[in-house]
Every structure is written in structure tokens, then in C-alpha cells.
Amino acid sequence: MRSRRTSWLTPLVVGALVALVASPAFAAGFGIFEHGAKAMGMAGAFTAQADDGSALFHNAAGLAFQKERSIEVGTTLISNVTGDFNGLAPYPGPTADGQQADAIFFPAHAYWVEPLGPNWTFGLGFNNPYGLAVEWDNPNTWPGRYISYNVELRTFDLNPTIAWQASPNLGLGFGIIGRWSDLELHRRVPFLNPISSQVVDIADVTLESDLDSGYGWNAGLLHKVTDRFSWGLSYRSKIEIDYSGDGTFRQISTGNPQVDGLVAASLPFNQALPIETTIEFPDTASLGFAYQFSRAVLVETDFNWAGWSSFDALPINFTQNDEFDSTVREDYDDSYNYRIGLRWDTSPSSQWRFGYVYDETPQPEASVGPLLPDANRNGFTIGYGYSGTYTYDVALMYLIFDERTRNEDFPGDAVFHGVFDTKAVLLGLTFGF
Amino acid sequence: MFRRNLSIAFVLAVLVAVPAVAQNTGSADFSRFVALGDSLGAGFVSGGLVRGAQEDSVPALIARQATGQIIRQPLVAPPGLPPLLQLSSLSPLVIAPLPVTGPPGLDLSPLHQNLSVPGYDLGDALRNRQRGPTDLATFILAAPPSAQPPTMLELALAQQPTFAVVWLGNNDVLGAAVSGRVIEGVTLTPTSQFEADFTGLVGTLRGAGADVVVATLPDVTVIPYVTTIPPVVVNPATSQPVLGPNGQPIPLLGPNGPLSLNDRVLLPASAALRQGIGIPAALGGTNVGLPDELVLSAAEVNTIRARIAAFNQIIREVAQQTGAAVADVNDLLIAAATEGVNIGGIEFTTDFVTGGVFSLDGVHPSPLGYAVAANVFIEAINQQFGANIELVDLFPFLFGNEASAIPSIPGASVSGFIYTEGAGSQMREVLQVDKPSTSGDGGGRDASGSGIGDAVRAIRGHR
């Protein structure tokens, strides 16, 4: 028993190794909601179904109805089609623009479902529920480089869960979430060169945290009211992670020895300066209703809430050099998203899926910027699944962000006005054994 | 063919109909624009007037953003009038006037739209008809020949203005701060007189049909000219205060003995301090106190601040009564002095030389500082007149050719500086402050001799 479990853990470990890669934020804020191609095909409207391993993310109570051992592994390939910026007055002004670097990201997921008896099911989930990767082309000219030219936030969750089938049509689930995360930020330091009277870059700053952790919990309920109608409720708690790490300044020559000498005397170059920061990841709740219209067609609609007001600031504290401390004010609002999915069984072993999501941004206008230009988005999905001796699911999502214009600032915070325009394509793949 | 010609005509019509800069100016009419002001309105930087900075003066930027037009201003060719102060060495930091190469190059055409005269206070704008040989007004308020020279207000009204920028009153409080002396009625205008004059000036312009924007007066006790030199003995090698036997900083000597920590020492004291004036004998000084002209006592600071608050109250009330917009320049200055101004991640402060908001004279803003102030005016105009005038693009002021020759070093520590005798005497001349009796090592230049006097001689030659 013991050795078998260990071998079953192998995919999870492999997943953990490959999965600590950055992901752009593809649920509003910097959340990621695509953790299984089946649910993704229905735009994530899955709380009242939760009938595969991704129940470990969407609704833990779904495990209570899963009576066979399964292992699923998968990934979601995310590619930004566009990430453009055009400046507005007063700064950086209408002549300034920027473009996000092309990149492909692949947040991973792995689920192990193990029935423990007639009414109890254990599960272990792994995924990357939050992520941020915003890299702007050409750090030498990107007008937002003094705020950020490259930021990466990586997370992964291990989520052991137990579910209980309380009655033939009622399931309950509860889990513990362990979250590991690290954070990396690159920016430039400006200097108004008194010789040239122009702003020049004098240093490149890298802020890099260790892999730090935090803990939380989740719970779910799934009620199959009739053969045709079910509803579910799922909650995941907020998790705070305190990060520690290093900040390093590297000098960039201005070409003027007198200026460079003054700069060299003013900044502690090439030393690892200890830094600290904190992120409070939001709690989330999902309420879903599923209805089987015919033998072939099921429709689910979900209402999701995220307590993003937990994310009020990103403070970066240099514990021994507080003159370099900075705080990016965020002041996020709680947000909602609405999902509808359609499942169409074309045969006992194959399903087509379609979905639509409207995802409301939690980000207030004044915090839109080089670190994260978020916006309300509309997502359209199509998916297909096959189940036999093994299963596979694929899903494709086209995500269109509303154009986001920033024309206001938090008092005292950096002025940075402009229009951000983002589009993305997501391809989900999940294999089950 | 006919159809094609029609479409070309249509395209042409559209092209002609759309102005170069399509701005919504709301109910404000910018067709005849004038500005009444002082050195701030004139775009005075680093101790002088010079073309590049004048072209980016606050009135010029407002008009350019609102209409796309360039206003008529009394432009001065480099090195400026008086010649601009420059950073002649970074380490040690030396600030001195640019060398004079010949008579000033002046635009001598009459009837400028920007009528701002450095040194003018509110009463001058209403009543001053002097055109003395060293008066900048002789050049700036140039008018067609008449029985008597017009006042600034008369010259503005002669242009039948539809829009007027009124940025006056700064010199009604600045004199007290930069001369180190509060003298009621001389360096500080009495409140009752300010109220009568401000009401009269704005009322006259409104009565003549002009839309008006006014501005609050900046707290002149937080400018670098006043805040840079601490009232304690500083070790020039470390830039740190010298500590006495009790571990406390050692105060400089003022006109009445040791200074308090709330007293201010003015920027031109730099030259006196290098001669040991104000420094106790035990620390190698002359044991002679700094003269009153170089010290602003804590009590004088409080008197000036109270007067500014009273004037700003009057400015707001008059604006309220007359429907004028109010640009809260003081709010901007206080924000810059306390928290700094963050533009795209670049932090600007009111620190001397290093801050970026002020120019090298320690009194007047840098071109960037003026551009940020112009945006405060534009926001006020937009709000009051339902306009939607685009703000000034600050990017060229940081990275482009508008950055001009005004240095600043955010984030860097500058270990001591030298504000030369020449720079000090130029500023005292510009600010109409008597030269301190204790200075005068012979190195100072007479600004009127090399700058303004030449300008007026040039005007006379022209006529």
C-alpha cells in the first residue's frame, strides 16, 4: 500500500518540478481558473458537476461521488496574442508605447482521487492557482521601466482533501491548502543627469524572493436534487504569504565618469540586500446550478466571487536599507465572474463542451499599470473529451480583454497614464488514467 | 470622375474643418488670450529669462494645449537675462552665472500676450507705470507710444481679452522670505490692500468679458532658497552636523546670537559661511553672526505663512464670487515638499539641485516644475469651464529637448555645494533684496550692469 502510494505520487512530483513556472494572470486579478480541460471547455462552470479530478479545485464535494481511483495530469498552455500599451498625457504621453514580450506559459495540474470506502473519498490536488508574468519588450526604452519591466509571481498548491457522501444525493468535502510561492521583479532606477539634463538609467534592480509558503482551507457542498438538477457551493479561504528574499542593484554607466562616480558612491551596488514583502491571496466562493435538459445536453451556470479587497498593497521593504522601501498601492475590490457551460454527449464515450465567461476585474483604474494591466474580460471556450480505458480532455479558450484606460492615479503614487490592450489564447490538455 | 472629385472635395472639407489640435475648451473662450503675472508666469528659471524656458512658461503651455497656438512672449536669447545660473562643476557642486558674450538678444515687438514681469507684485500690475533703465517691464510691457506708459492691466485690457491667466501675488509674500525681513507694507503686503487689489483686478477682467483662472500663492517658506541650509554647523567633508559635547548639533550664529532649530538660513548665506561668518570661533569661524538679511527667524516664518493663508482665502473667495477657476499651486508645492511628486516611478522633490522641481536659483521652478504646475491650471480650467483640454505631456521634459539645462539629481546625495557670490548677488538683484553688508569679496557681478542695463540700452538703441 505504502509503496504503491509513493509511486502514484510520482506524477505529482514531476508536475511540481515542471510547474513552478510563471503564468500570466488569466482569471481577473492574478488568479488562474483553468485547472482541468473538462471544466475549461465549459468556461469553468463546473461547481455543480465536479465529476472529475478537478473537483479538487472546483468543488471538493464532487469527490464524494467518485467511486474509482483516478490520476489526472494536464496543463494549460497560455499564449498572449497581444499585450500593447499606448501612453496618454501627462505621462508617459501620447508618443510613448510598449509591447509585452511574446511568451508561452504552462501552468500544470495533477489530481489523485482515491476512494476509501463506500462513503469516503480522499484526494490530493496540485495546481498553480495564482500567477503573474508581465514582461515588457526592451527594458532600455519601455517607459514604465522605473515601475516594472518584468514581474513574475509563481504559486503552487498542494491540496489534500477528504469528501463524504452524506446521503445518496448529498456530498460534502473539506481540504487543507498548502501554498508555495515566489516572486521576482525587475525595474530600473532613474537619474536626471545634470550634465545632459535628461533622465537616464543608472541601475538595474532585481528583487527576488525565496520560495515561501502559507496555509489555508477549502470546503464544498454538492446536492443532486433530482436526476436532472444539481447545485454546488465551494469556498477556498484566503492565504497570506510572507516573502523574504534579496534585492540587488547593478550599476548602468551613464557614460559620464563624474556622474557614475557620484552614483557609485550613493547606491550599494552588487550586494544582496535583504527584502520582505507580503501578499494576501483572496478567498473565493462559487455557486453553480446544473440542469440536464435531455439525455445528451446539460447546462450549468456559475456565479463566482473573489475577495480581492485583501490585495491592498504590494510593499517592498529593504529590512536593512529602508531608504529603498517602496509600496505599490493596489486597493483591489471584491469581484464577481459569471460562467455558463453546455455539455453535449455525442456518445457514451465522447463529449463536446462549450462555454462563455464574463470575468470582472477587481483592479481599480489607478492601479492599472506596468505591473499588471488587468481588465474585464470575455472568454469563449470549446472543448472535447474522450473517456475509455483512459481519458483525455482538450479545451480552447479565446480571451478578449476590454481595452483598459488609466487616466487617474492614487494621490502621491506614480503617474502613468495610457491604454492597455490584451488578448490571449489558452489551450487546456488533461489526461486521466 | 465627377463622383471622385466630389469625394476629394469632401475629404478636403473634412481636413480643413478639423483644427490641428481639436480640444474641447468648454465654455472658456481662448480666442484672445493674455497672462498677467510675475517671474513665475514669465517662465523665469535659474536666475534668468531665456527663450527655451519662456516657450514652456505656464501661460504658453495652457494656450498651446487649449488652442494649439503659440502666444506672443518677450523672448530672450541665450545666455538669458540675467544670464542663467548653471552647474559649472558637479563635484564640488558649483553654481555660477553663465558668461556674458554680448548684449542680450531680445524680441522687442510690442503688445505681448504674456505680460508677466519678474518682480511685479499685485499693486505693480495695477499701478506701476515706471519704465526705469533697469526695469524688465520696459521690455516686457512694451507698448505703442502713448502719453504715459500703460500698466500691465491696461495693456491686457487693450487686447480685449476673452481669457486671462492671473498668477499674481507671489511677490506680495516672497520679498519677506528671501530678504529675511518681515516689514509690513514693504516686504509683506497688508491683507486689506491685497484684498482690494485682487478684487479689483479680477473684477475688471471679468467685467471686460474675460474668463479667468487664478492661482493660490505657494508657501514660499518651503522653497529650497529657504530650506536648504540647516541652522547648524555642518562638517563640509561629511555633510553631517557637527555635534557638541552634549551630543546636540551646534547652532549657527545669527544676528541675535545662536539660531534656533526652527530658524531658516537663506541660500546666499553659503558664501558667508565659507568665510566663517555665522560659525563660532571654537569651530574655526569668525564668531560674527550671520546678518539679518540671511536669516529668516521662526517667528518670521509663522508671520509669512499666516499671511499666505489669508491671501489664499481671499483668492478663493474672489474666484468664487466672479466665477474664476482656481489652480491650487500651493497644494502642488506642499505635496512636492512633503511626499514628493512621482512621475512614472521617478520621484521629484523640492530639494535643492537634487529634487528636480526647482531650478538652480532655489526660488523658481524648473521647466518640469512649470509643466506640472501648468497641468494644475489646466485641470482647474477643465473643471470650472466644463472643458476637456489635454494635459501637458511631461515625457519631453524628462527625456526630450524640453529637459533644458536645468539639472537635478534625484536620489543622489550631494556633499555640499557652492552657491557662488555671483549667483547670490544675481538672485538678490532679481529678487530686489539689498546685498548683505557682510559679503562682497569683489567676486560678485553687478547683474544690472551686465544684464538688465544692457537690455534697456538695446531697447533705446532700437528706438
Image (cartoon, coloured by chain):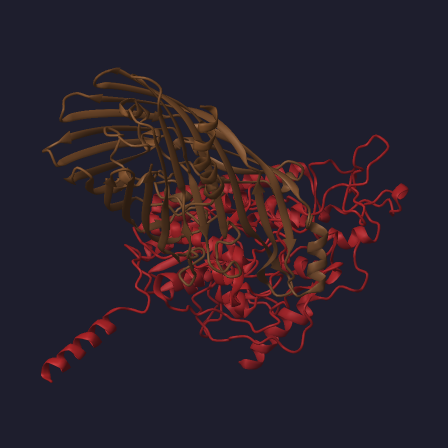
- At 38% across and 61% down in the image, what residue appears? B65
Residue A14 drawn at (x, y percent): 47, 40
Residue B107 drawn at (x, y percent): 51, 75
> Is residue A322 shown left or right of residue A335?
right
Quadrant location, the N terminus of chain B: bottom left
Out of A193 and B142, give the one closest to the viewer: A193
Residue B24 drawn at (x, y percent): 29, 58
Say if B343 sits above or below B57 in the image. above
The answer to whether residue B353 is seen in the rendering is no
Q: How many marks?
A: 0
Residue A388 drawn at (x, y percent): 25, 38
Say if A104 sits above or below B307 in the image. below
> Is residue B345 shown left or right of residue B180?
left
Out of A199 and B185, give the one closest to the viewer: A199
> Is residue B225 shown left or right of residue B421?
left
Snapshot quadrant of residue B212 = bottom left
Out of A251 and A265, give the one closest to the viewer: A251
- At 69% across and 59% down in the image, what residue appears? A260
Snapshot quadrant of residue A32 = top left
Out of A209 and B297, give the one closest to the viewer: A209
User: Which one of the lettered chains is coloured red?
Assistant: B
Q: In the displayed orientation, state which residue is furthest to the bottom.
A: B1
User: Chain A in the picture: what colour?
Assistant: brown
The answer to whether residue A169 is seen in the rendering is yes
> Is residue A382 shown left or right of residue B230?
left
- At 51% across and 54% down in the image, what residue appears? A145
